[in-house]
Amino acid sequence: MLEVRDLKVSYDGVLAVSKVSLDVREGSIVALVGGNGNGKSTTLRAIAGLNAADKGSIKLAGIDIGVMPAHKRVTQGICLVPEGRKIFAKLTVERNLQLGAYTRDDPHEVAASIDRMYSLFPILKERRHQLAGTMSGGEQQMLAISRGLMAKPKMLMLDEPSWGIAPKFVSKVLDTIQKVNAEGVSILLVEQSLHKALTIAHYGYVIQTGAIVMEGKATELLDNEDIKKAYLGL
Ligand SMILES: Nc1ncnc2c1ncn2[C@@H]1O[C@H](COP(=O)(O)OP(=O)(O)OP(=O)(O)O)[C@@H](O)[C@H]1O
Ligand SMILES: [Mg+2]
C-alpha cells in the first residue's frame, strides 16, 4: 500500500531524516518506533506532504504521491493524525468530523460517514454536541482518529496516539486502531514505546537519528533484547 524509499528530510540544511525506507502492506499495521527527536514525526510529515523531502520516493498503491501537494495526497487516500491530536477544541465533536471531510464534496456521503464513525465509536455520538476540548484525552484521540477517517483513507498514519492519555485508556486507543484496521484501513503507527506499538503491529521498524536501524516482525522485535537495550533504553 505504501512504499517509501531513501527518504531524506532536512530543516535549514540540517538532516533530520537521512535514511528511511519502509513498506506498509495492504491491510497491515506497521509500527515505527524510536526515542525523542529521532525523526519519527518528520518522516510522517514528509509522507503526508507537510514537510518537503530533499530526496526519496513515496508511492501509495503504486502511484507516486511524493510529487503531489499535501491535499492531493489526501484525495489519493493517505491521511495523517498528527502528534498532539490538533482537534479543534472550541468546535463540537460533530463539526470536527465534518471538517475532516474537507476533501469530499457529496454532503449525503459525508453524513453517512459521520454515522459510520458514530457506530464505530458510540462515545462520540453521545458527545456529538459537546465542545471537543472538554473531552478526556482518550476521547479526543478517538475523535482525532475518526476525523482522519472522514477523509476515507486507504492508509492512515498515526503520530503517537497514546501521548497524553491516562495509562488505563491507552489500551482503549490501541483497540480503536485495531478496529479501524479490521475495517480494511492500512496503518502506519508511530510510538516512542516499543511495547505499546508492537503489541498491535504486524511488522515494525526502529528509527535512530534519522535512519532505520532495524526491522522485523513485531513478535521478533519484541523478543529482541538488543533493541530494548540499545535503542529504547528499556
Ligand atoms: N520545525 C523544525 N525545525 C528545525 N528542526 C526540527 C523541526 N522539527 C523537528 N526538528 C528536528 O528534527 C529532528 C527530528 O525531530 P522529530 O520531531 O521528527 O522527532 P520525533 O522522533 O518525532 O521526536 P518525538 O518523539 O519527541 O516526537 C530533531 O532533531 C528535531 O530537533
Ligand atoms: Mg514526534
Image: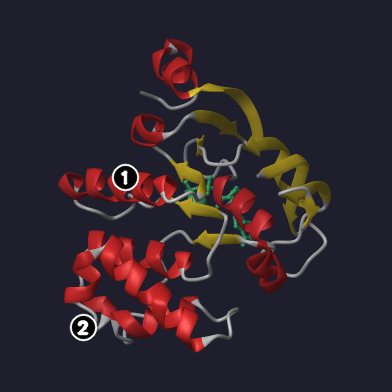
Residue 219 visible: yes
Whether residues under marks 2 and 1 lie with C-beta atoms below 8 angstroms apart, the answer is: no
The one of 142 and 181 positioned closer to us in this rendering: 181
Residue 119 found in image quarter: bottom left
Residue 87 visible: no
Specify the amino acid type for callout 2. Gln
Q: Quadrant of the N terminus?
A: top right
Going 67% across and 73% down the picture, which residue do you hit?
71
Residue 174's label in the rendered image is 1
Q: How many residues crowd around disc 1 within 10 Å: few (fewer than 14), some, or many (20 or more)?
A: some
Q: Is residue 221 above or below residue 29?
A: above
Q: Tally the numbered discs.
A: 2
Going 50% across and 51% down the picture, which residue do you hit?
185
Of the image marks 2 and 1, the number of the one nearer the N terminus: 2
Going 64% across and 30% down the picture, which residue do you hit?
212
Going 27% across and 77% down the picture, which residue do you hit?
133
Left or right: where 220 falls relative to 125: right
Mark 2 → mark 1, Cα distance in angstroms: 24 Å
Specify the amino acid type for callout 1. Leu
- Where disc 1 sits, the SS reads helix
The one of 22 and 42 positioned closer to us in this rendering: 22
Q: How many residues crowd around disc 2 within 10 Å: few (fewer than 14), some, or many (20 or more)?
A: some
- Where disc 2 sits, the SS reads loop
Residue 201's label in the rendered image is none
**Residue at which label 2 appears:** 130
